[in-house]
Image (cartoon, rainbow, N blue to C red):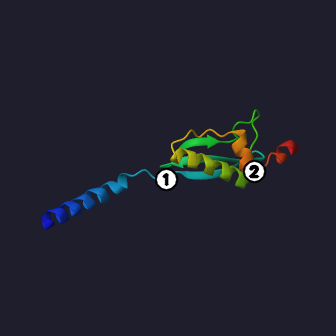
């Protein structure tokens, strides 16, 4: 009986490890320079899932003021996707991330 259990566990490990290569790659973020600011894309397996050239939820097409602001927003979107939530961003969330809107008036 003990040999059967060990053999079953061994076969299970082989099957699991064989399927490890089929697991999806993690989401990656790329922050890019655009116009007078920054945007971001979220990718999986070298395919763009989301490309956000402008700050989401704003009425006008305004780019992120800093690379850091774009990164923080993209990280929130990735977190939402990984938790099976809508990737939509609200003004309140942008304010909680302390996204800089002051530089927008200078453009």
> Is disc 1 placed on a helix, strand or loop?
loop
Q: Are marks 1 and 2 in contact (CB under 8 Å)?
A: no
**Mark 1 or mark 2, which has the lower sequence index?**
1
Q: Is residue 79 left or right of residue 56?
A: left
Up-down: is 90 above or below 29? Answer: above
Q: Foreground: 90 or 39?
A: 90
Could you tell me residue 76's position as x and y percent? Answer: 62, 49
- Quadrant in which the N terminus appears: bottom left
Q: Is residue 92 visible?
A: yes
Q: Residues within 10 Å of mark 2 (few under 14, many from 20)?
A: few
Give the label on residue 98, or none.
Answer: 2
- Quadrant in which the C terminus appears: top right
Could you tell me residue 81's position as x and y percent? Answer: 54, 44
Q: Is residue 32 visible?
A: no
Identity of the residue drawn at 82% across and 43% down: 104
Identity of the residue drawn at 65% across and 52% down: 31
Distance of mark 1 from mark 2, alpha carbons?
26 Å
Q: Residues within 10 Å of mark 1 (few under 14, many from 20)?
A: few
* Closer to the eye: label 1 or 2: 2
Could you tell me residue 77's position as x and y percent? Answer: 60, 46
Q: Which residue matches tag 1?
A: 26
Q: Foreground: 98 or 67?
A: 98
């Amino acid at each position: 009986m003990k040999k059967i259990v060990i053999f079953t566990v061994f076969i299970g490990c082989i099957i699991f490890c064989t399927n490890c290569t089929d697991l999806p790659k993690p989401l990656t973020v790329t922050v890019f320079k655009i116009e007078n600011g920054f945007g971001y894309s979220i990718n999986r397996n070298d395919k763009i899932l989301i490309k956000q050239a402008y700050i989401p939820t704003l009425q006008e097409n305004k780019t992120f003021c800093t690379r850091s602001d774009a990164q923080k927003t993209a990280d929130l979107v990735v977190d939402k996707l990984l938790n099976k939530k809508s990737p939509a961003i609200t003004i309140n969330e942008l304010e909680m991330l302390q996204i800089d809107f002051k530089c927008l008036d200078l453009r």
